[in-house]
Amino acid sequence: MEKGEATMSSWSPEGKQSPGSWEPHLCRILFLLLLFVVSAKGVTPDPNACLVFHSSNGSSISCQPPAKFPHYLPADTIYLATEFFNLTQMPADILQGIPNLQELHLSNNQLEDLSAKFLLPVPQLKVLDLTRNALKRLPPGLFKVSAALHTLVLKENRLDILDASWLRGLKALRHLDLSGNQLRTLPRKLLANFTDLHILDLGNNQLQTLPPDLLRGPLKLEWLHLEGNRLQVLEEGFLAPQPKLRYLFLNNNKLTTLAAGAFRGLQVLDMLDLSNNSLTSVPEGLWASLGKAAGNMKGGPVCSRHVRRRGGSGPQTQLVGAGPAERSAARGSPAPGQDHMHRGLRCL
Ligand SMILES: *[C@@H]1O[C@H](CO)[C@@H](O)[C@H](O)[C@H]1NC(C)=O
Ligand SMILES: *[C@@H]1O[C@H](CO)[C@@H](O)[C@H](O)[C@H]1NC(C)=O
Ligand SMILES: *[C@@H]1O[C@H](CO)[C@@H](O)[C@H](O)[C@H]1NC(C)=O
Ligand SMILES: *[C@@H]1O[C@H](CO)[C@@H](O)[C@H](O)[C@H]1NC(C)=O
């Protein structure tokens, strides 16, 4: 039995095989040829057609030029991407008849506005990606039926103001990306209803101040991007509602002042980037207020502060690579090695 199988799967140039073994060979070759033809079709799709993938859950459609913008969509569409078309308007009825849609990717168009009725046909939508469009406003009521939406990406548009009413209707929001817009202020209560928010990206806007209540509402924030703004002050208590915060980006701002208790209670902070600000000193006790985190201070031009190593055992804040003077400074006690401390923090 084993011998027979070995003959079947090996080529014998001496032709010592029994004539019967040719048939399986032929079958194998034909099968491989068939496989090759089928997979070649799958690997090089027609660039002029949208990619369509059917699964038991529904159809996924992905289109970008030179394919034509789709005008017919299967009724079971769950995923739709129409990107890089430079459309200024979405066809009004594009989402009609695909009530199961879960993900909609519209990045790299030139959308200037959306109809308030645009999302009404797709109440199961979970992900909406509008990266790199030209949106200045959103129509109030856009998310009226979007209770399932958990990811909203508005990165690199032209928003210069926001109105809390624009987001009304969202109940499951976990990831909100407003980075790369021109926001100068944020309205009060913007996030008041988003208790499940995990990721908030406000990076690369023109924010000078933040509403003090911004983070009252979310309870589970893990990532907060505020880099690339014009923030001058980080108020005491601003971060206090977020004990689960793990990644905090404050680099490329104009921070001159950090309140001594600015980071108090951030027990699981893994990463804090304060590089490229205008901080000349930090208040005594600032690092100590990071609670039980074990620290890891990196100097140099980047100056990301990894404030906690996974599995770090030290109960007190520690600046790795720093001398005892810096460590004691880090704990807020008088620092005899002040210049050491400053060398460590110059990159701030
Ligand atoms: C279908 O949906 C289920 C549940 O959402 C998911 O676990 C599964 O991976 C999906 N199957 C396909 C082929 O996408
Ligand atoms: C969209 O605009 C970009 C930049 O202007 C251009 O390179 C690209 O060819 C345009 N695409 C289409 C489909 O018109
Ligand atoms: C929060 O939700 C409540 C109840 O749905 C609603 O009345 C209120 O307007 C929402 N607040 C904001 C700022 O959207
Ligand atoms: C520092 O931040 C400013 C914005 O405040 C930015 O324009 C500049 O490119 C940043 N410099 C570096 C080296 O990242």
Image (cartoon, rainbow, N blue to C red):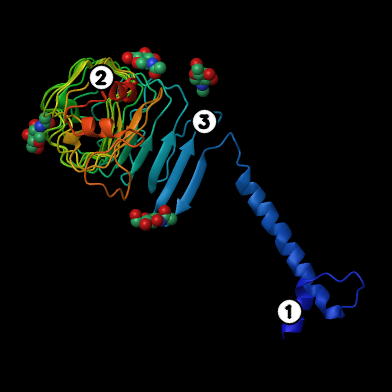
In the picture of the structure, the residue carrying the numbered disc 1 is 5
Q: In this rendering, does residue 19 appear at all?
A: yes
Which residue shows up at 87% across the image and 78% down it?
17
In the displayed structure, does residue 57 sit left or right of residue 194? right
Between 273 and 164, the one lying in front of the other is 273
- Kind of residue at badge 2: Arg
Kindly report the distance in space between the C-alpha atoms of the residues bearing marks 3 and 1: 51 Å
* Residue 200 seen from this side: no
Q: Secondary structure at mark 2?
A: loop
Q: Are marks 3 and 2 in contact (CB under 8 Å)?
A: no
Give the left or right position of residue 289, taking residue 87 as reference.
left
Q: CA distance from mark 1 to mark 2?
A: 69 Å
Q: Quadrant of the N terminus?
A: bottom right
- The first of marks 3 and 1 along the sequence is 1
Residue 196: image location, x then y, percent? 19, 42
Task: Determine the secondary structure under disc 1.
Answer: helix
Reply above or below: 76 against 108.
Answer: below
In the rendered structure, find residue 97 and report the number of the disc placed on it: none
Relative to 121, 302 lies left or right: right
Q: Which residue is mark 2?
A: 137
Crowdedness near tag 2: few (<14), some (14–19) or many (≥20) residues, C-alpha within 10 Å: some
Q: Earlier in the sequence, mark 3 or mark 2?
A: 3
Disc 3/disc 2 C-alpha distance (Å): 28 Å
Q: What is the crowding at mark 3: few (fewer than 14 residues within 10 Å), some, or many (at least 20)?
A: some
- Taking the spot 37% from the left edge, 46% from the top edge, the residue there is 78
Q: Nearer the viewer, residue 11 or 70?
A: 11
Residue extending farthest to the right is 14
Kind of residue at badge 1:
Glu
Label 1 crowd bin: few (<14), some (14–19), many (20+), radius 10 Å: few
- In the figure, residue 101 lies in which quadrant? top left
| Mark 3, residue position | 68
